[in-house]
Image (cartoon, helix red, strand yellow):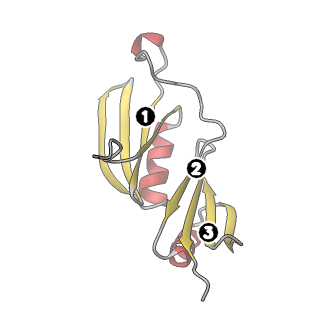
């Protein structure tokens, strides 16, 4: 039986802080830009590569006439992202040297992850982790 869930995974959300968020992911975190668009003042977005998935940010349009039925334009609450990396200590040191503020500094978790987290401009928490295996 073929897996119906094959393909890419995207975490997508709307933001009122589009330019600040764009620069945070691109310049501060150094994520690769998959693509972006700027169709008009109400339709801008960008997709960034993060681990095995993608983060898509979109400018929240101000008027109802620019919104599509079926999409949720509310500010995200209670959501966070978890991104596995190959060397969490190296990434932590890189972000520390850039002055990125941490929500939680690097720590070895009892469940076998070594991780840290940052807060992005919209209040979402991004956890970066590496699996640590016990000998």
Query: Please, which residue is most extreme toward the top here?
Result: 65
Spatial separation of the CA atoms under disc 2 and disc 3: 16 Å
Q: Quadrant of residue 111?
A: bottom right
Q: Is residue 50 left or right of residue 120?
A: left
Q: With respect to residue 42, does 12 lie above or below? A: below
Q: Earlier in the sequence, mark 3 or mark 1?
A: 1
Q: Which residue is mark 3?
A: 115
Q: With respect to residue 64, does 111 lie above or below? A: below
Q: Position of residue 112 (x, y in %)?
A: 63, 73
Q: Which mark's residue is nearer the viewer, 2 or 3? A: 3
- Residue 20's tag is none
Q: Quadrant of residue 110?
A: bottom right
Spatial separation of the CA atoms under disc 3 and disc 1: 28 Å
Q: Considering the numbered disc 3 on the image, is that residue within a helix, a strand or a loop?
A: strand
Callout 1 crowding tier (Cα within 10 Å): few <14, some 14–19, many ≥20: many
Q: Earlier in the sequence, mark 2 or mark 1?
A: 1
Callout 3 crowding tier (Cα within 10 Å): few <14, some 14–19, many ≥20: many
- Residue 58's tag is 1
- Residue 120's tag is 2
């Amino acid at each position: 039986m073929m897996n119906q869930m094959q393909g890419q995974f995207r975490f997508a959300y709307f933001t009122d802080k589009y330019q600040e968020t764009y620069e945070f992911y691109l310049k501060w975190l150094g994520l690769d830009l998959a693509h972006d668009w700027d169709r008009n003042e109400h339709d801008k977005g960008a997709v960034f590569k993060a681990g095995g998935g993608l983060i898509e940010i979109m400018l929240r349009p101000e008027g109802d006439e620019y919104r599509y039925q079926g999409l949720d334009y509310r500010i995200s609450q209670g959501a966070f992202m978890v991104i596995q990396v190959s060397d969490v200590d190296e990434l932590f040191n890189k972000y520390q040297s850039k002055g990125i503020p941490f929500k939680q500094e690097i720590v070895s978790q009892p469940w076998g992850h070594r991780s840290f987290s940052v807060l992005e401009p919209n209040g979402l928490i991004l956890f970066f982790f590496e699996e640590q295996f016990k000998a």
